[in-house]
Structures are given as C-alpha cells and as structure tokens.
Amino acid sequence: MSMDPPELLTYVKSDAGFDQMLQVQRPLPEAYLQLLMKKNLCHRRLYRQVILFRETFWTLADPIMEQLQSLTIPLSLIERYLGVVARFESLETVDFLMDIIYSFTDEDIDETARARRGEDWRFAARFVQDHTRLFKGVLKTVTYGKVWIWPWAHYHLDCDQEVHMEILKLLPPAIITVLTECTWSQYIARPMESDLGRIDDIRRLYPWNPWIRGIQDDPLILQRCRSLKTMDIVSPGQGGFRWAVLEKRYTEGLGHRTSSKDLYHGHYNGHETPAQDEPRSLYWQQGLLPLAEVKITEGDMPFTDEVDDIAIGFSRTLESLEAITLGPKNAFLSSQLISSPLRLFFGRGWVDLPLLSNLVLNSLYGPLAIDSQLFSHCPNLVNVQISDRMVNYKYEDIEAWQLQQPAELFKVQQLSLTGLSALTFHPDTLHTTKSLECLNLAIAPTEDIAQRIHRRFIPPVEEIERFYNLQRDRAIEVGGDDGEKTGGFERGGLALDRQLPPRRWSWDWDLPCLTHLALDAEFAYRFKFRMLQKCPSLELLALDISTVNEDTHRRTLSIADLFVSKFNNSDDDLSSSQPPHEQEERIVARSSENLREIEHEKNEFAASGLIKVVKESMPEMGYVGLYGYDPSHEEAVALGLNPVPSDEVVDYSTQDQ
C-alpha cells in the first residue's frame, strides 16, 4: 500500500487503519481500556503514539544495524529484531524496554498473561544467546529500560530474575568498579571469574535489597575488594569485619602467632567460618584496604562488634565513619526494648585514627555510650554528631558508664551530642576547641503525639546540685586547690568512683570561632552567661528548659547574671548570683551588638528582665517576640515597647512610633 504522508495520516486515524494496527500489535487489556475511558483519554490516540514510539527505534536502526554499538529494543518487537540479529556485528550494549501491558496491575495478572510475559523475556534471552554465539565477546552489557509510556498502568518493568541471570551468564565477566544492586547481579552470575579487586565504591547495600543476603552469608566478599575507598552498606552482622582487624595485626607484625591459614579462619554470626583458599591468604601482601569513608546501617539485629572492628581495622586510612541504627526490626525485639532498652557501646579497643575527621553515631533506641578514650584516639575530628533516644535517666545510671576523659580536639568545628554522650562528656575538652563553630548539647525529647509537643527530661534540682557539686569537689581534690582535700565522695546518698575523671563545668572556655550555641534540658538549665564573655563571634544562642514538670525547673534572668567577677571564676554552683558591684564587669557578646531580632518562647526566663537587658545593652534591637508572655502596660511603656498583637504571639517593637 502506497500513500502520501497526508493520506497516510488520515488512514491511521481511521477505523480501518486502527483495526489494521491491532492485527500486528497486541490489544490492550480490557480493564486498562476502561480506565482510559474513565480518564477521558482516547485510547486510539494513545495507541498511535505508542506504536510511533516503538517504530521509531526500528526505523532509525534499520539502515545502520551493522555499525550500531548501542541499541534499545522494545520488547513488543523482540521477534522482529531476532530475525536480523546477524546484522548487529558491532553491538556492545543492548537495552530491553518493557512496553507491554499484560494486565491492569501487576498484582491481578492471570496465569495466561504471566506465561506470556515470561515468554517475551525468553525471547530477549534468546537474542543475547544468538548474538554471543555469532559474535563472541562483543556484547558486554545488557540493561532494562524503565520508560512509562502507558499512563496510569502499573506494569512490571524489570526482567524476570531467572531470565536475568541466564542473560548475565552469557556475557563476559564484567569489570566492576562500583558495587551496586545492578553490578552485584553481574558478580553472582559468574563469581569465580569476576575480579572484585577494582571496586572502589560500594553504594547503598541496604536491607530491603534481597541480594544483600549474599554479603551477609559471606562477608569475606568485601575482603576481595582491595581498592575499596568508600562504602555505604547494611551491617553484615557480628564478625563481619573481623578479617580487617586480623589483617591489620598481621601486617603490623602482630600476627607472628597467627598462620596465614588461621588469619582467614574465624567466627562469623556465631558460626565457624572455613579457612579460605590460598590466594586470599596472600591479601596482606598487597597492603591494607584504603578504606576512607564508611556509612554502616544496622541490619536485622543490633550492632555488636562491626563498628569497632571497622575503626580498628582501617584506622590508618579512615576519614569518615557513620553508624546509623534503624530501630528494632521485629515484634520480639520491640518488646525487649520496652522492658530493657538496648544499650550500644562504641569505642572498645580503638587505636589512633589520625585521619578521621567525620564521626556520626546514632541510636534510635536506648542509650549510646562511647569509650572514655574515644575522642583521644581521634585528634583531627572536624565534625562530631553522636545521638541516642535516651529520654530519662538517673545519675547513678550515668556513673555506670565511662565518663569521658579530657581530649584535645583542636580542629573540631561542629560538636553535637545528644543523650548519654552529652551527659558523659568532659567539659575540659572545650578548653582545646579553638576552632569550634557550632556546639549542641541536648537530651532527646519525649513525644506527646496527641498534643504535638516535645518536652525534655531534667532531673530534680537537688539531684543536679548534688551530682555536679560532687564532681566539683572531686576536681578540687585532684587539683589540690589551696592544698586542701575534701576527703569523702558521698553526699546525699550519691557517690562517684574515685577512678572517674574529675569534671568541673567552668563555663569559661575560650571559643573565638563559636557562632551557634544550642543547649536544652539540664545543659540549658545550668548554663552560665559568663560563657558569652569568651565567645566573641556568637550569632545564635538557643536555650530550652521546657520540661515535663515545668513548675519545678525555673531560671530567673537578672542583671546580675550578666556580670562576672574580674578576679574570681565561680564554679558550677547553681545558687543565686549576687548583685553586681564595682569589682565586676558586664558580660558582652560582641556579635550581639549588631543583633536586631530576638524571640523568646514560654516564660522560664523572666521576660521583662530579658527585655530590659536587650533594651539597654543592644540599642540596635528592632524586634522582640514573646511567646506565652504578655508584659504589663506599665512594663511596655517603661521599656518603650509597642505591642503588635497576633494569634499566638504578642510582638513588641522597640522602635519609636
């Protein structure tokens, strides 16, 4: 049939033309046709567009099939391409595109349609088989395109796994440099012939990918990746990185008691692992893995030794370490957490990590404790974020964990500690953090879903005073102030181990680069404004003492709080400040001189006093926002505040009207 383009277009749009197309193309499922009608979309027009989409590939490829190195084949036309497979002598990459709807949704596919889909994918495998037989070693890559050419259809785009593996086995062993879900399939298709030595990056091996089980079943696969530099992976389980520790000991001359056979014979997930073949026993001769960046996510069970083994085994090269928990994975574990919260502990056996600059440790359940020497092993840390979901505590529980030893963190710029890590932190470390820009000390909030509010736990005031005064006494004894010893370490039923490092919160740290300071819970409650005296770059100060029992924890801000003695640094005593006198000087945060806006939530601080300080000390201030507090008319007039009411907040502008 010969027609000019205008006549052809008219014919295609006609009933006769559409009927002829249906003779060579598969009709759409009835359920899908009904959906198109509901959407007011003409299925004939859509069908013509899809057919044009399919035919375009063939029309463009037909004249130059012998020269093509890459080709996309719509699966609906696979039999047509099979007939000319001998023409693709240069083809290196083929992309099979699923463009067929077998049912309205993939879930309601019947057995007939399912068998038809399997048959179509078998044709794809046959294309690869015929090509590799005709042109051995030429075709190297097979992919599966994902283009949604049918609107609102939920059809299965991926190749059937069984057929996919058949196709991969027909291809030559892949050169894998990045291990992903796709390249993992290439590996397991021909594991004995695949070279993992070039892999330098492992990406997103997460538990919801079924193929991660392969690494969990044999974590020594990671050992074969001798060029590995970055890794984002779900934990392979207990013992999954023990090989790295043994390798390191062996290369450092500590393995003289360990044979090369024993080096790769140990325990994994509670089971004895068999000795590896001789080539693996020679890995140590190639040098240690240059692993620099690790993000490891908790798997089905809680972390055990994985994070510590990574830190020890790759201590020479590790630059970034992130360990993230996802919470309990099953009902049994959830019930166990409710009755007896799991407690993670990181840092056992760590050695010096001279290159580590980024450390992120996160627990979504229970306390997360770190070894008392952990920071001392990481002198070049720049970013530190450690958090857990410990929402309440007793000081006796804190003593059961190792309080931090002072550390020298000269390069740290961001320090964020939430939970147990904040409570055990040694404040003397802040005397060395001259580069610190952001400091955050916090406790995880309890959540009231009904009221959508967050409150943080603060121990009773008397317990806070006993605990920190006791630590202060310990510091005095160790330091020998005035040659006197305090003797006992028990007060009010609270005692500290004499071996614990003395801690004294002096609040006088010299932090010239600090721009952001955020404290909540007991850290905000104990905050001393004299800290601002040595924070000349401070731009943001956030203090939040909102707690479950708001009436029991109140701080009153007065003028006295903004003065410090010229001759004596007071300690961490929470007693009321004395009125300023001629021997005291005003605390001034230099950056606050340019501050123009301030907001205050709730009334834990006396808002009128705060406004007065702002009014007198910060003449450039143009806006004050008070949440939950409405100063009297007399206060507003005296301070020159002009009310600007709104629904939830009363704003007061200090600008003259």
Image (cartoon, rainbow, N blue to C red):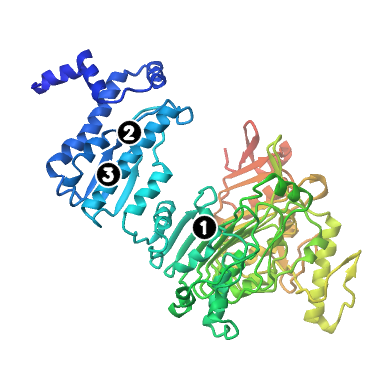
The numbered dot on residue 530 is: none
Image mark for residue 233: 1
Q: Amino acid at mark 1?
A: Ile
Which is nearer the eye, 629 or 89? Answer: 89
Tell me the residue at 54%/71% (across/down): 411
Report, in whole angstroms, how far the alpha carbon at label 2 lies from the one at label 1.
33 Å
10 Å neighbourhood of mark 3: few (<14), some, or many (≥20)?
Answer: many
- What is the x, y in percent for residue 101? 37, 29
In space, the residues marked 3 and 2 are separated at their CA atoms by 17 Å
Label 1: few (<14), some (14–19) or many (≥20) C-alpha neighbours in 10 Å: many
Q: Nearer the viewer, mark 3 or mark 2?
A: 3
The residue wearing badge 3 is 127
Element assignment for label 1 = strand
Q: Residues within 10 Å of mark 2 (few under 14, many from 20)?
A: many
Going from N to C along the chain, the mark reached first, 2 or 1, is 2
Q: Quadrant of the C terminus?
A: top right
Query: Callout 3, which amino acid?
Result: Phe
The amino acid type of the residue labelled 2 equals Asp
Image vertical order of residue 4 relative to residue 424, above or below: above
- Say whether marks 3 and 2 touch (CB < 8 Å): no
For residue 99, the mark is 2
Q: Are marks 3 and 1 in contact (CB under 8 Å)?
A: no
